Amino acid sequence: EEDGCFPPAVNNETCLLRITSGLMEFRMYLEHLQAKFRSDEENTRVSMVLKNIQHLIKTLRPKVKNLNEEATLKPAVAVSLMENLQQKNQWLKTTTIHFILRGLTNFLEFTLRAVDLMECGCPCLRNFMGSASHGQNTPSCPLDT
């Protein structure tokens, strides 16, 4: 991919932009979902996830140049999402919610791997790519475990 998060084309700025934009997009999806949940327990869970996503966005935003502060869902996506969540067909509603939550889970897994690689530094990335670190003092890297 051209997101700059993984070798051989690691670019921290591009990667952080991709991560922050993705978090902002999922925040919007979750806000739409929250409006559709009826029980307090479901709303509490979504509120906690939204709060944590907002915290991540707030933490990453200062590190990212050129971030579009006005991230919005594409109109066609928003219409489709609303139609699926307003269906009387419970299966379609449940499936839509499942896809959103599965997408968020996959995105957070991607984000964790990317951040781990960024924190490793170049020597770790060289190890990841298969070349020796040449005896350099390398930071602790999750890939070494």
Image (tube, grey):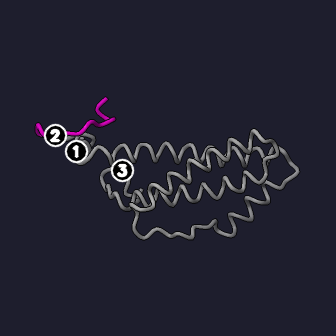
Residue hosting label 2: 133
Q: Which x, y percent locates residue 90?
A: 84, 45
Question: Within 10 angstroms of label 1, few (less than 14), some, or many (20 or more) residues?
Answer: some
What residue do we see at 56% from left, 50% from top? 53
Is the residue under label 1 in contact with that under label 2 (CB below 8 Å)?
yes
Amino acid, disc 1: Arg
Q: Main secondary structure of the magenta part?
A: loop
Residue hosting label 3: 6
Is the residue under label 1 in contact with that under label 3 (CB below 8 Å)?
no
The CA span between labels 3 and 1 is 12 Å
Q: Which mark is residue 126?
A: 1
Residue 94 is covered by the magenta coloring: no
The residue stretch that appears in magenta = 132-145
What residue do we see at 46% from left, 68% from top? 67
- Give the secondary structure at mark 3: loop
Image height of 134 relative to 77, above or below: above
Left or right relative to 87: residue 8: left
Name the residue nearer the viewer: 51 or 139: 51
What residue do we see at 27% from left, 41% from top? 128
Name the residue nearer the viewer: 48 or 12: 48
Q: Which x, y percent locates residue 51?
A: 60, 49
Among the two numbered marks 2 and 1 on one chain, the one whose residue lies closer to the N terminus: 1
Among the two numbered marks 3 and 1 on one chain, the one whose residue lies closer to the N terminus: 3
Check the image and name the residue furthest to the right: 88
